[in-house]
Image (tube, grey):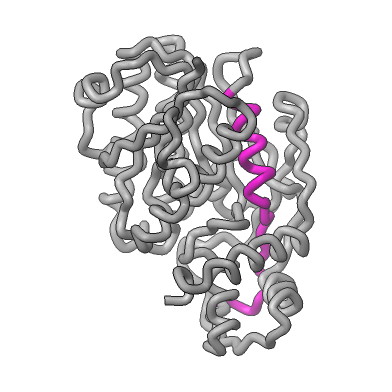
Amino acid sequence: MKHYLITGGAGFIGSNLIKRLFEQEPGIQITCIDNFDPFYSKSIKEYNIQDFSSKPGFNLLKKDLATTGYQELTELIKAPVDTIIHLAAKAGVRPSIENPLSYQQANVIGLQNMLDFAKEKGIKQFVFASSSSVYGINDHFPWKEEEKLMPISPYAMTKLSGEMLGHVYNKLFGIRFIALRFFTVYGPGQRPDLAIHKFTKAILKGKPITMYGDGSTSRDYTFVNDTVGGVIAAAKYDKTDFEIVNLGNNYTVSLKELIQAIEGITGKKAVIEQYPDQPGDVPKTFADITKAKKLFGYNPETKLKDGLQKFYDWFCANEALLLK
């Protein structure tokens, strides 16, 4: 029986991943570690996992990996583990500027503890959630994995540190380490602090939305089902021992275009309040996904309009929880 250890499994991407794994691989065992960080409502994370929390193959550990060493993890998780998928992290560019030390603790020390656990238990497959933010300001679009990296926020720096930490553990201890650079993931279950969720909620409540800059900033929005497919493929990948791979959608959408698309889905006009650009934000993200296609057979299929509609349907179905 295959055993996955998934950190951050009660969050947005993690819960979608666990749901897909249970659908695709009946009989598997999943240990989920999540500290239910108050960055957003605990009730949303509890809702995320309600469909599988009672499954016999599911085990939830409420632990903060920044303060839980590998020795304690070894005591808590007795069964052999086949694959670690490390999604747990303190998220957000702007909050990381205000409190960089907490991001070091959660994102670097937390990863260190998981890698030490993998070393102790002899776990050879480790998938790490990195971020497109490591590229920083770079106009060589679309971004290839070999680009020079110039992160401009503490959050981005912790993700780059994580990639290099994985490289060290691969070389020293033979752990296969696959770092996946996520590009603005959205869809059902999306975190409430992210733009699509915030904008939808504000428009439906008739409140203004905040637009930083002139609306020309753009992102490579990737639907969560496509991202999850890439994560699962990375978990099964065994051809090489260390890889860094973009998981994006290979097209970019401006902030103005995004707002217009959400207006089209909701049928309501946005009230926009414009502010200056924010420190730490990059003007554009745009993924070259050639490598992901080659190594994983990765093929994102969801167009923005379709993905927004699926998010909106999920949002409307859960208004009582999300419109509080």
The span shown in magenta is: 212-235
Q: Residue at x 42, y 30 (%)?
A: 56
Up-down relation of residue 193 to residue 148 (above or below):
below
Q: Is residue 150 visible?
A: no
Percent coordinates x, y for residue 213 in the rendering: 59, 77
Q: Is residue 293 visible?
A: yes
> In this orientation, which residue lies closer to the viewer: 163 or 83?
83
Q: Is residue 57 left or right of residue 253?
A: left
Query: The C terminus lies in which quarter of the figure?
Result: bottom left
> In this orientation, which residue lies closer to the viewer: 151 or 265?
265
Q: Residue 182: which quarter of the image?
A: top right
Q: Is residue 61 magenta?
A: no
> In this orientation, which residue lies closer to the viewer: 143 or 229?
229
> In this orientation, which residue lies closer to the viewer: 74 or 163?
74
Percent coordinates x, y for residue 237 in the rendering: 63, 19
Q: Is residue 72 left or right of residue 37?
A: left
Up-down relation of residue 309 to residue 201 (above or below):
above
Q: Residue at x 76, y 28 (%)?
A: 297
Up-down relation of residue 63 to residue 91 (above or below):
above
Percent coordinates x, y for residue 92 in the rendering: 43, 57
Percent coordinates x, y for residue 163 in the rendering: 47, 32
What number of labels is visible?
Answer: 0
Q: Is residue 219 magenta?
A: yes
Q: Residue at x 73, y 74 (%)?
A: 265
Q: Residue 268: which quarter of the image?
A: bottom right
Q: Is residue 209 left or right of residue 159?
A: right
